[in-house]
Amino acid sequence: MKQTIAAIRDAVAKECWLPALALALTIPDVLGQVAYPELVNNRGNRLVGQQYRRWFHENVEHHFADHTGYDDNWDAKRPYFTADMCYKLRCEILHAGNDDIAFEYGDREEDRDYEYDFELRVNACNSFGSWWVTPYGGERVTEHVRVCIDIKTLCDALCEEAERFLQHVGERELEGHSVRIVDVAEFTRLNRGQEFI
């Protein structure tokens, strides 16, 4: 996991936004599996979405508190970017190649219709808000809700919370959660002149 975090931070520093985002969105996948191995179905298969959302909610969601602030447990009372939204973003980015997520944010009123818009940004800050137009005649009010997330901010929050989480996890729990890459050119350079059987 440390190499993953380093790769994300490197991609962010180089402004390689999509690779940074795609890799960062896998952090709750891996750490959700480590943190909640009991979340499996009756066949023993992991409940990926539940593990993912729970880890994000408990570890990252507080970074996205709106103006209502935090509850007594320091959880965001009403986050503008939720565990569900992050899981949907992960699924869309990794499996469909887009950021078209369906979500609801804020309190809904019965006499209004709602349209939601999610936007990824760079070199910006997170923002959220809504606007509506006064209808003509008997039309219903349509409230337009927009949530904008800065990729660097999201990547940083995921990396920081992963590092914090890893301080309380043993090496044994992380077995099987690493990527081994062999640099053949480097291996050859270091071992030039040696015979191998």
Image (tube, grey):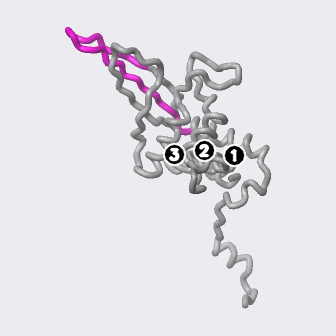
- Amino acid type of the residue that numbered disc 1 sits on in the rendered structure: Ala
Residue occupying image coordinates x 68% and y 79%: 188
Q: Which disc, if any, is residue 35? A: 1
Q: Which disc, if any, is residue 51? A: 2
Q: Nearer the viewer, mark 1 or mark 3?
A: 1
Q: Is residue 62 magenta?
A: no
Give the crowd class for mark 2: few <14, some 14-19, many >=20 residues within 10 Å: many
Residue occupying image coordinates x 29% and y 10%: 134
Which residue lies most toward the top here? 137
Residue 129 location (% of width, % of height): 45, 20
Work out whether 188 lies above or below 197.
Answer: above
Give the crowd class for mark 1: few <14, some 14-19, many >=20 residues within 10 Å: some
Q: Is residue 140 magenta?
A: yes
Sequence order check: which comes first, mark 2 or mark 3? 3
Q: Which disc, if any, is residue 17? A: 3
- Amino acid type of the residue that numbered disc 2 sits on in the rendered structure: Gln
Quarter-of-image position of residue 139: top left
Residue occupying image coordinates x 63% and y 28%: 62
Residue 149 location (% of width, % of height): 50, 33
Magenta span of residues: 130-152
Separation (CA) of disc 1 from disc 3: 28 Å
Residue 93 seen in the current view: yes
Work out whether 105 lies above or below 169.
Answer: above
Q: Secondary structure at mark 2?
A: helix
Give the crowd class for mark 3: few <14, some 14-19, many >=20 residues within 10 Å: some
Asked if the residues shown at circle 1 and circle 2 are in contact, with their CB atoms under 8 angstroms apart, the answer is yes
Q: Which disc, if any, is residue 66? A: none
Sequence order check: which comes first, mark 1 or mark 3? 3
Separation (CA) of disc 2 from disc 3: 25 Å
